[in-house]
Image (cartoon, rainbow, N blue to C red):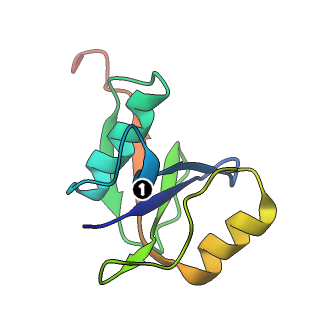
């Protein structure tokens, strides 16, 4: 089962670790993980789109890192998403797998 760590595009802070986000990691896609993170902080109704790891967003987005390799844990659970050493470890030890953009639906889509 994949464990994802999501880093906010604008702040550079870790916003979530699916290993301990409203319960343990679960089978889910990258966009489902982003939705679960947003819903955990009260953000509902966004549309999510996954892009390759080198995508450069110009909107609200998460950089998604895979924090497990064949089920092994290469990182302890993130407890302080603003700690620069922890952010550096995620970027160094984990594999960046995607960028997920998050947008509000257009008025006529709501």
| 67 sits to left or right of 13 | left
Residue drawn at 75 percent across, 50 percent down? 82
Tell me: residue 35, above or below residue 9: above
Would you say 105 lies left or right of 96 here?
Answer: left
Task: Kindly identify the residue that appears in the image at 45 percent across and 49 percent down.
Answer: 20
- Crowding at label 1, few (<14), some or many (≥20) Cα neighbours within 10 Å? many
Please identify the quadrant where the C terminus is shown: top left
Q: In which quadrant will I find the N terminus?
A: bottom left
The answer to whether residue 32 is above or below residue 97 is above
| Horizontal and vertical percent position of residue 109 | 21, 21
State the residue at coordinates (30%, 67%).
2
Residue toward you, 97 or 75: 75
- The percent position of residue 8, horizontal first and vertical second, equals 59, 50
Instruction: Farthest residue to the right: give it.
Output: 84
Residue 94 picture location, percent across and down? 52, 78
Position of 62 with respect to 32 (left or right) is right
Q: Position of residue 74 (x, y in %)?
A: 51, 79
**Residue under numbered circle 1:** 19
The total of numbered circles placed on residues is 1
Q: Is residue 62 left or right of residue 35?
A: right
- Front residue of 7 and 90: 90
Q: Which secondary structure, mark 1?
A: helix
Which residue is drawn at the image coordinates 55% and 72% (left, top)?
75
Pick the residue in front: 87 or 19: 19
Judge by depth and name the residue closer to the eye, 76 or 33: 76
Res 107 → quadrant: top left
């Amino acid at each position: 089962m994949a464990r994802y760590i999501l880093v906010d595009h604008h702040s550079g802070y870790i916003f979530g670790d699916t290993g301990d986000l409203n319960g343990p990691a679960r089978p889910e896609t990258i966009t489902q993980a982003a939705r679960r993170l947003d819903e955990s902080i009260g953000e509902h109704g966004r549309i999510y789109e996954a892009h390759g790891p080198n995508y450069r967003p110009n909107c609200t987005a998460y950089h998604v890192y895979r924090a497990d390799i064949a089920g092994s844990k290469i990182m302890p659970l993130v407890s302080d998403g603003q700690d620069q050493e922890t952010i550096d470890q995620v970027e160094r030890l984990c594999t960046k797998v995607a960028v997920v953009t998050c947008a509000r639906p257009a008025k006529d889509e709501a």
